[in-house]
Amino acid sequence: MLNSLVNLSFITICMAGLIDGINPCAFGTVIFLLSYLSVRQRKQEMMLSFALFTIAVFVTYFLIGFGLFQFLYKTGSYFIVARLFQCVIAGLAFIGSALSFYDAYLAFTKKNKFILRLPDFLQKRIKNAIREKTMTGNIVIASLVLGFLVSIFELNCTGQIYFPSILYMIKTGSAIKGTLLLFVYNVFFVFPLIIIGLLTYSGLSSRKLSGFLTEKIGWFKLVMAFTFLALGILFLL
């Protein structure tokens, strides 16, 4: 029975990380970054920049999650507080599920003013950061700083799945297991970034990637809706 629960936790976290990684918010930013890099840099420089960017995203995202995990894990030693956290997060997950289903409906009916998306001012700040940092002479520093900034700015969007997943990791009852699951989550979170980078390096244009995202965004929203629903149910078990 214990092994089954561990396997369920592992599979759930892997799927949540992967789905968070293909979140339209994150996907759109990465496509914009690659299109901008492809214009300003040679292919080898572009891939170096993107690799460093991905590493910075992984490290930043993991450290944010680790800090939150440690805080909630210690707070979770108080049963009433822990149960209250679980109920609140379960409620937010169900709300996220309902909003994602509605966003999917908007996507399938070609009404693309989604509810769960990055605010316009954050989208503008991310694009400005990409333009400014890619013009910097030092590729290494610019790419690492850009990965850090984009991770922070996008938490408003990617955190919708990340934070409930962290609370679910705490339910394992072990700080070591929870930290390992957090690491696995972030590996799967950056996996789509790696795939996009390799596809771009092999010759796939950012225009085609953007077209694919636009065409399939309704399905992405549906997957997110079911992910929120599953997380909400798991919190109540």
Image: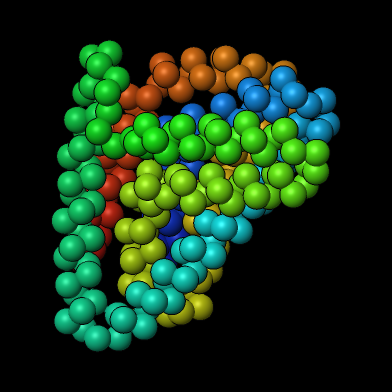
Tell me: 4 left or right of 201. Answer: left
Q: Nearer the viewer, residue 113 or 177?
A: 113
* Up-down relation of residue 212 to residue 22 (above or below): above
| Quadrant of res 82 | bottom left
**Rendering coords of residue 127 (x, y %):** 53, 32
| Quadrant of res 197 | top right
* Up-down relation of residue 72 to residue 62 (above or below): below
For the C terminus, give its image quadrant: bottom left
**Residue at position x 63%, y 23% from top?**
35
Tell me: 185 left or right of 107. Answer: right
For the N terminus, give its image quadrant: bottom left
**Rendering coords of residue 207 (x, y %):** 57, 14
Residue 52 visible (yes or no): no
**Identity of the residue furthest to the bottom in this view:** 78
Residue 139 visible (yes or no): yes
**Rendering coords of residue 148 (x, y %):** 59, 51
**Rendering coords of residue 115 (x, y %):** 25, 33
| Tag count | 0
**Residue at position x 65%, y 25% from top?**
36
Tell me: 36 left or right of 6. Answer: right
Task: State how the image is colored.
Answer: rainbow
* Up-down relation of residue 1 to residue 124 (above or below): below
**Residue at position x 17%, y 46% from top?**
95
